[in-house]
């Protein structure tokens, strides 16, 4: 039997997360205190600690939540486990870029804040496991180590998304998806 979360708990967690995100846009992670978060969220410290152990736990939950929603927004499992037609692959990538665009403040905060490298590392690990399944080892990749290719493609993809975000998304999601898919195809990732 599935249990429903009380709406008050959901509202409180949302307020805490929004407060935390707002603070991340204003100052470095290590300068943010539980008092700062609690005051901004209009909750007391005890309420904060009912939901999170500390600000690192809040950061971890926030990262997990956004990465999971990003992945599900683009049918990532389908993208990594099946051979997709070009149009399906571009649509999946476009959905990913749209999700990032809609959550620009979160992603830009995570990528520009010095102490939140955990976000980049988790994104790399998540994409690396998916990329592992997609890399074709014949053709241009037949004489190259698969781990090296996966690391190269993952780093290139994350770096490109990071650059797109930090430059205020100068190209639309559709354009980014088409360009990225072309690069994936050229490098044996289908």
Image (cartoon, rainbow, N blue to C red):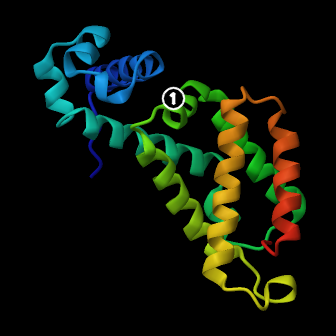
Residue 178 as seen in the image, left or right of residue 102? right
**Most foreground residue, 20 or 151:** 151
Is any atom of residue 96 visible in this view?
A: no
Please tell me which residue is depicted at 27% across the width and 20% down the height of the picture: 8
Number of other residues with Cα within 10 Å of mark 1, as a class: few under 14, some 14 to 19, many 20 or more = many
Please tell me which residue is depicted at 75% across the width and 30% down the height of the picture: 169
The answer to which quarter of the image holds residue 60 is: top left
Residue 20 as seen in the image, left or right of residue 154? left
Please tell me which residue is depicted at 85% across the width and 61% down the height of the picture: 183
Q: Residue furthest left?
A: 46
Q: Is residue 53 above or below residue 104?
A: below
Q: Residue furthest front?
A: 114
The image position of residue 185, as x and y in percent, is 86, 68
Please tell me which residue is depicted at 76% across the width and 82% down the height of the picture: 136
**Most foreground residue, 16 or 125:** 125
The image position of residue 99, as x and y in percent, is 65, 37
The answer to which quarter of the image holds residue 9 is: top left
User: In what quadrant of the picture does the C terminus appear?
Assistant: bottom right
> Number of callouts in the render?
1
Q: Is residue 98 above or below residue 155?
A: above
Is any atom of residue 142 visible in this view?
A: yes
The image position of residue 21, as x and y in percent, is 43, 23
Label 1: state its secondary structure.
helix
- Residue under label 1, please give it: 109
The image position of residue 5, as x and y in percent, is 28, 34
């Amino acid at each position: 039997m599935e249990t429903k979360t009380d709406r008050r708990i959901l509202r409180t967690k949302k307020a805490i997360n929004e407060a935390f995100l707002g603070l991340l846009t204003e100052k470095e992670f290590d300068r943010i205190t539980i008092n700062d978060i609690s005051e901004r969220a209009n909750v007391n410290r005890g309420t904060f600690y009912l939901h999170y152990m500390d600000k690192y736990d809040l950061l971890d939950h926030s990262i997990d939540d956004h990465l999971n929603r990003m992945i599900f927004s683009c049918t990532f499992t389908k993208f990594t486990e099946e051979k997709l037609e070009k149009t399906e692959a571009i649509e999946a990538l476009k959905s990913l870029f749209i999700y990032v665009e809609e959550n620009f403040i979160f992603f830009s905060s995570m990528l520009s804040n010095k102490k939140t490298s955990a976000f980049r590392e988790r994104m790399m690990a998540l994409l690396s496991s998916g990329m592992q399944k997609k890399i074709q080892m014949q053709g241009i990749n037949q004489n190259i180590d698969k781990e090296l290719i996966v690391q190269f493609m993952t780093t290139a993809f994350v770096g490109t998304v990071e650059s797109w975000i930090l430059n205020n998304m100068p190209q639309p999601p559709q354009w980014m998806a088409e360009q990225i898919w072309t690069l994936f195809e050229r490098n044996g990732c289908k």
